[in-house]
Image (tube, grey):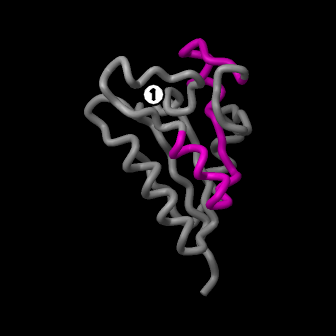
């Protein structure tokens, strides 16, 4: 069976009401089934890849360990919505993952190449 191209679009922060950590776990699980996984961080999802998170201040665990597991699972195609990051004052030096920054046109091209898009 041919692997599918799956794009996970993360639009929500890891902390608060939305289960951000569970989304990262779902990405790892999908990868274990041999699918071609890509991840796009945009909108409030940008905060998931912000360096130096201090989740302990709100009695939470940081998602940085979950993100570090991406490399082990060979999830290497990570993307950042340039507009979302700039609107939040986040630069390439502020993120904890090696990701490609995409403008709106590049995001549209990425979306068009997918077999399935999962947006959270």
Residue at the image position 66 percent from the left and 27 percent from the top: 82
Which residues fall within the magenta stretch?
A: 65-92
Tell me residue 4's x, y (percent). Answer: 59, 72
The local crowd at label 1, few if under 14, some if 14 to 19, many if 20 or more residues have their Cα within 10 Å, is some
Residue 70 inside the magenta-drawn segment: yes
Tell me residue 46's x, y (percent). Answer: 53, 29
Image-based side of 42 in relation to 96, left or right: left
Quarter of the rendering containing residue 60: top left
* Residue nearer the viewer, 23 or 114: 23
Residue at the image position 50 percent from the left and 27 percent from the top: 47
Q: Quadrant of the N terminus?
A: bottom right
Q: Quadrant of the C terminus?
A: top left
Circle 1 sits in a helix, a strand or a loop, which is it? helix
Residue 37 inside the magenta-drawn segment: no
Tell me residue 90's x, y (percent). Answer: 61, 17
Quarter of the rendering containing residue 16: top left
Residue at the image position 63 percent from the left and 66 percent from the top: 36
Residue under label 1, please give it.
Answer: 44
* Residue nearer the viewer, 77 or 94: 94
Q: Residue furthest left?
A: 17
């Amino acid at each position: 069976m041919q692997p599918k191209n799956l794009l996970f679009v993360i639009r929500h922060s890891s902390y608060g009401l939305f289960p951000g950590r569970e989304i990262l776990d779902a990405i790892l699980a999908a990868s274990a089934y041999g699918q071609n996984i890509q991840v796009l961080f945009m909108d409030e999802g940008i905060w998931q890849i912000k360096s130096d998170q201090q989740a302990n201040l709100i009695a939470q665990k940081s998602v940085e360990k979950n993100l570090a597991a991406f490399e082990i699972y060979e999830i290497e195609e990570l993307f950042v919505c340039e507009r979302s990051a700039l609107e939040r004052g986040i630069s390439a030096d502020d993120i904890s993952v090696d990701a490609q920054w995409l403008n709106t046109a590049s995001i549209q091209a990425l979306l068009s190449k997918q077999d399935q898009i999962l947006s959270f």
